[in-house]
Image: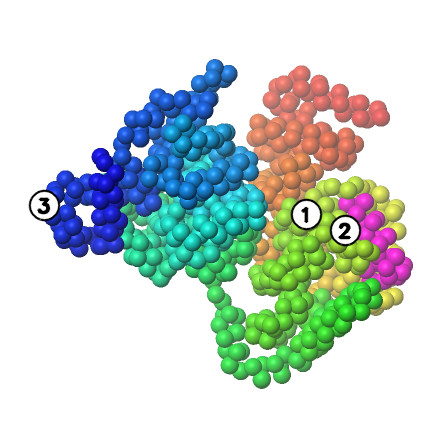
Amino acid sequence: MDKERFQQIKSIFDEALSFNQPERESFLNLKCGNDSELKNEVLSLLKSIEKSEDFLESQLESVYESGKKLEDVLIGRQIGNYLVDGKAGVGGMGIVYTGKRNDKEFEQKVAIKILKYGFNSDYHLKRFQIERQTLAKLQHPNIARLLDGGKTTDGLPYLIMEFIDGIPITEYCDQKRLSIEQRLRLFTDVCTAVQYAHQNLVIHRDIKPGNILVTETGVPKLLDFGIAKLLDEDFAGIADGLTKTGIWHLTPEFASPEQIKGENVTTASDIYSLGVLLYLVLSGHKPYHVSSVSPIAISSVITGENILKPSDIIKKTREIKSVEGEVETLTPADIGKRRNQKPEKLFNHLKGDLDNIVMKAMHKDPSRRYVSVEQFSEDIRRHLVGLPVIARKDTASYLLSKFVQRHKTGFIISILFVLFLIASIISIAWQADIASSERNKAKIEARKLERVNMFLQGMLSSVNPREIGRDVKVYDVLEKASNDIETELRDQPETEIEIRRSIGNTYTSLGEYDRAEIHLFKALQLSERIYGEESQEVAASLHDIALYYHWLGNFHISDSLYHKADGIYRRVLNEPTQSMANNLNDYALVLSDLGSYEEAKKFFEEALDMSEKINGSKSTDVASIMNNLAINLHYLKDLKNAEKYYLKSQEIYIELLGEDRPEVASTYNNLAFVAMDKNNLAQAEEYFTKSYNLKLKLMGEDHPDVGLALNNLGAVQLKMKNFNSAEDYFVKAISQFKKTLPQNHVWAGISYYLIGKTLLEKQRYKSAELNFRKALSIRKKAFPKGHNLIYITEGELGLSLLKQNKLNEAEKYLLSGYNGCKASLGEKDSSTVRFLQQLPVVYGKLSDNEKVSEYEEILNNLSDD
């Protein structure tokens, strides 16, 4: 085929794309006249597109079909150190061949990507060079590796890439009949790769099933950064030039509205495409039904059409064209079968969180999507472990804000009377900062404080959750204040940051976590924009969010955020501040919760030293850190020093604040545990009762701290062998947690464990087993592998199984509990010894005399010591 003929076909083909199917035949008759061969060539290209799942790939494949000589020339040729041995498919800018290393050094199968004839202009060569530079930066287990690159003897650029023997992610999920949970976990692996690329300043721009292959072992590999665009300033000039060409290097059905409209493409565009991919992976349907290949028609659908939620679209029966052009009727039963769920259960599974997650990622406004792929992925992980997600539908509070805009004056008057302790707290913090800052900064802070005081006059004196409990009026005030921020402080971001932090932290303390996160995450976003990522304001926001996750029981995320905040404080501050000391204190708390007691002790001691230098030896900050240090020393079995710090902490609180304070309630609670460990159960019961009564008085019934106090009262009753009373307390605690905390919160795990212990004593072994299993499930999700609480729970579960003569399972859990406790707590720890004592029993019942002798000898040696 000569060049002139090829251009004629291509020109008519391009024009034909703008016509709908009924009009296209008339257009071709007009353009081609009596030249039936010309018409057939164009029809062949159009048919090829209709068969294809991806618009752009079909277009390129069609152009390739018009010049078959390229394949004839390259098959069997040597390119670099590799021999081309077949054609694999079509990529974003060229044909992809298979090949093998041909220099006898070692065998290696590869993918060879070559820029095609018709795409070798200076512009495309420049794009290809950028692609090579881009790929060279990306080294990730879920991204196909770039092995080599260069130009052929004909001047065609090529890339040698890792050959991925896999199938598209959608096909893999359906062939393996993966459940929704399995699909979500696989998808988070893809997110990890995309987030890595974003951190390396690369936007993929063409995320779709064909660019994500999954190997037989279940490893997803992200392919084809051929249309990626560097964000790095080194390439800014080149990238700007490329943007102006207006060429679609994307797959429209997976492209974001801003890509379709030719607007700026950011990481938000990849987030949108990931949302489309997740929509398809979960529901089996694409969100948009594109019946035309016309760019105008596609643009109209993507940018203007509202989509059904995944849970709604699975109720539809649709006809879908396969890649081969075959029509398949997809019913709700088909979709459910491929996910091992009945349609009605699948609907319930997708409805709610998963609908909201997908729709947030696919929001037409980029600013309303997730701020990063990492946040998107984290929301999925939170869903998987039963935590609240960031994504949510527009709520009544959002609608109320619209009303407030129309009734500003009356609303502001009501707000100004409501808010004071927040302002006082902020004022104290700012005064400390101003004292150590240069004069001009002090003036800025003073103006900011004045604006905050105008907005928050008197609020916290009436909304302190530890003093007044769940007063409905307080909730109304917080709700109204939240709405007014949107209108009154839009042009005052510094003030908005402080107010959102204060309201967010108040909501966290109230146990209103879904409301808290709105303000805390917004404060972080504003802080990063106004102050930059390396600033103490960002560190303070990170600390707030870490505390929020800590309350939710997600210790791993909390740990990483405290660590990040600590690093920023150390880099940007010349002198320590109380904010830095507070972050260290809370960081140590989560480390203690994770079982890293020695590391936690180091941070507690540093925080205490820092706080005493800033405030003197008697302050509420010093008392708080002392109390937490004492808790950690208690875990380390240093009861003498733990009791000393508890008493010093309580003394400071009572002197400075009086007795009716939640801080005093906490010290009573902690002193009770010391009394329990000393076997002074009467005193322990007295302290626990004082703690419970104070918390109930200050916080009201519907607060998780009150549930925790019920747990502790049950614990002392259990130790006193008042089993019925203990069980009643634990059941009440679980009921409390169900009302105030996310499902399967770590505190509920404590209750299930203690109920299991109680039922074991009451010889209700089957019920004990069920409660231990619940506790173990929660603790395995909440704590890292190797945490002593996991081993203790396994051992107790083993005991309940032994009592039921379920010997094989009993052996498994008792052995794991014993070995784990021995490694983490020591061979003489009471739990270690308790499980060791049962091992000869279980092996005796299994008639394994050798094992009986082995563990009896270990027991005897312990007794001799």
SS at circle 3? loop
Residue 491: name its quadrant: bottom right
Instruction: Please state, as top left, top right, bottom left or bottom right, where the N terminus lies in the image.
Output: top left
Task: In the rendered structure, find residue 34 and report the number of the disc placed on it.
Answer: 3
Task: Report the residue at 77% width, 66% height from top.
Answer: 429
Q: Residue furthest right?
A: 617
Q: Amino acid at mark 3?
A: Asn
Q: Position of residue 737 (x, y in %)?
A: 61, 56
In this rendering, the label closer to the viewer, 2 or 1: 2
Of label 3 and label 1, which has the lower sequence position? 3
Quadrant of the image containing the C terminus = top right
Q: Nearer the viewer, residue 626 or 124?
A: 124
Q: Any mark on residue 559, and which?
A: 1
Report the side of 232 relative to 117 (left or right): right
Instruction: Classify 851 as above or below 343.
Output: above
Decide if residue 62 is on the left or right side of residue 442. left
Return the residue nearer the eye: 456 or 199.
199
Q: Is residue 285 one of those drawn in magenta? A: no
Q: CA distance from mark 3 to mark 1?
A: 74 Å
Sequence-earlier tag: 2 or 1: 1
Residue identified by numbered label 2? 570
Give how far apart the Cα atoms at labels 2 and 1 are: 17 Å
Secondary element type, mark 2: helix
Q: Are marks 2 and 1 in contact (CB under 8 Å)?
A: no
Please name the residue shown 84% across and 54% down the image: 610
**What amino acid type is highlighted by mark number 2?**
Arg
Name the kind of residue labelled 1 in the image: Asp
> Dot 1: within a 10 Å radius of its alpha carbon, few (fewer than 14), some, or many (20 or more) residues?
many
Image spot of residue 747 (x, y percent):
65, 51
Residue 65 versus residue 721 in the image, above or below = above
Magenta residues span: 600-624
User: Nearest the camera: 266 or 840?
Assistant: 266
